[in-house]
């Protein structure tokens, strides 16, 4: 017997199914990532087609199925799409966030509402437009990795634990490494970039926005490398982000 349940969710992506249906991928607060069929939403007279688009925060009712659930009711709680899609930088950064969540959630066996709340907060900040989109994205990516258990070591050596400061970053080792533990492939990193990573991880916008462009770009590259390493593949949308 199928189970009917409700949850809050954010639409991560959609793709067509047949002539009138659509498969919706959601990150939900209580059930993690869910894939569901929304029947008839591609028809002009659909009751809730527009509510099932990316960047939307919704209250959704679903029937639980074996592989795909079925959407039976949708209520919009908050929509960020209009503000996000009106600006290219916001749109590409927000798209990269959704793609990263989609990939990361495949590796999470016990979903926590913290990831959902982090995404909602990041979407809300992105839509507001007060913080540069690339900073919102980088902070979100770094904090998402931390929630997944991959917090980079930004003070002690990731290999032997000796206290820093250290001047090399080894993505495979998990962060900064000392001279004795430095392996081929570790990259030199400036102290200002490390401090910027610490600010992003803490969500300290007041100080993060003061970082110079070179520092921001260096930190962004490290974050992108970390995401690629842990996901074992690149996030396609990151290539379109304006930094």
Image (cartoon, grey):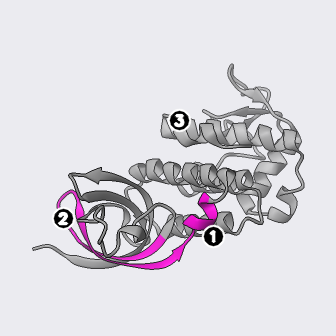
Q: What's the distance in space between the residues labelled 3 and 2, CA to CA?
A: 31 Å
Q: Considering only order in the chain, which callout, 1 or 3, is on the residue closer to the N terminus?
A: 1
Q: Secondary structure at mark 3?
A: loop
Cβ–Cβ below 8 Å for labels 3 and 2? no
Neighbours of disc 1 within 10 Å: few (<14), some (14-19), many (20+): some
Q: Position of residue 66 (x, y in %)?
A: 17, 60
Give the residue number, with chain letter if any, for mark 3: 234
* Residue 74 belongs to magenta span: yes
Give the residue number, with chain letter if any, for mark 1: 124
Q: Main secondary structure of the magenta part?
A: strand
Q: Considering only order in the chain, which callout, 1 or 2, is on the residue closer to the N terminus?
A: 2
Neighbours of disc 3 within 10 Å: few (<14), some (14-19), many (20+): some
Cβ–Cβ below 8 Å for labels 2 and 1? no
Quadrant (top left/top right/bottom left/bottom right) for the N terminus: bottom left
Quadrant (top left/top right/bottom left/bottom right) for the C terminus: top right
Of residue 153 and residue 120, the one placed in the foreground of this image is 120
* Residue 12 belongs to magenta span: no
Give the residue number, with chain letter if any, for mark 2: 65
Relative height, residue 121 to residue 185 (above, below): below
Of residue 230 and residue 137, the one placed in the foreground of this image is 137
Q: Position of residue 125 (x, y in %)?
A: 68, 67
Cβ–Cβ below 8 Å for labels 3 and 1? no
Q: Position of residue 130 (x, y in %)?
A: 77, 66
Relative height, residue 160 to residue 62 (above, below): above
Q: Considering only order in the chain, which callout, 2 or 3, is on the residue closer to the N terminus?
A: 2
Q: What's the distance in space between the residues labelled 2 and 1, CA to CA?
A: 31 Å
Q: Which residues are magenta?
A: 57-85
The residue located at (60%, 33%) in the rendering is 172
Left or right of 137 on screen, residue 62:
left
Of residue 50 and residue 171, the one placed in the foreground of this image is 50
Relative height, residue 178 to residue 144 (above, below): above
């Amino acid at each position: 017997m199928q189970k009917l349940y409700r949850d809050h969710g954010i639409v991560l992506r959609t793709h067509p199914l047949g002539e009138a249906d659509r498969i919706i991928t959601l990150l939900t607060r209580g059930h993690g990532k869910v894939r569901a069929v929304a029947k008839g939403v591609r028809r002009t007279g659909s009751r809730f087609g527009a509510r099932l688009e990316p960047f939307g925060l919704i209250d959704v009712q679903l029937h639980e199925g074996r592989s795909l659930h079925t959407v039976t009711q949708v209520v919009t709680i908050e929509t960020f799409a209009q503000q996000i899609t009106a600006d290219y930088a916001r749109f590409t950064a927000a798209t990269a966030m959704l793609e990263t969540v989609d990939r990361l959630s495949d590796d999470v066996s016990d979903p926590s509402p913290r990831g959902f709340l982090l995404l909602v907060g990041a979407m809300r900040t992105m839509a507001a437009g007060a913080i540069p989109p690339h900073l919102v994205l980088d902070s979100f990516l770094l904090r998402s990795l931390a929630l997944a258990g991959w917090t980079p070591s930004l003070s002690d050596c990731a290999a032997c634990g000796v206290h820093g400061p250290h001047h090399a970053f080894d993505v495979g080792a998990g962060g900064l490494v000392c001279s004795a533990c430095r392996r081929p492939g570790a990259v030199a990193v400036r102290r200002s970039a490390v401090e910027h990573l610490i600010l992003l991880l803490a969500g300290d916008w007041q100080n993060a926005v003061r970082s110079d462009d070179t520092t921001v770009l260096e930190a962004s590259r490290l974050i992108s490398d970390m995401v690629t390493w842990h996901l074992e593949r690149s996030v396609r949308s990151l290539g379109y982000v304006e930094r």
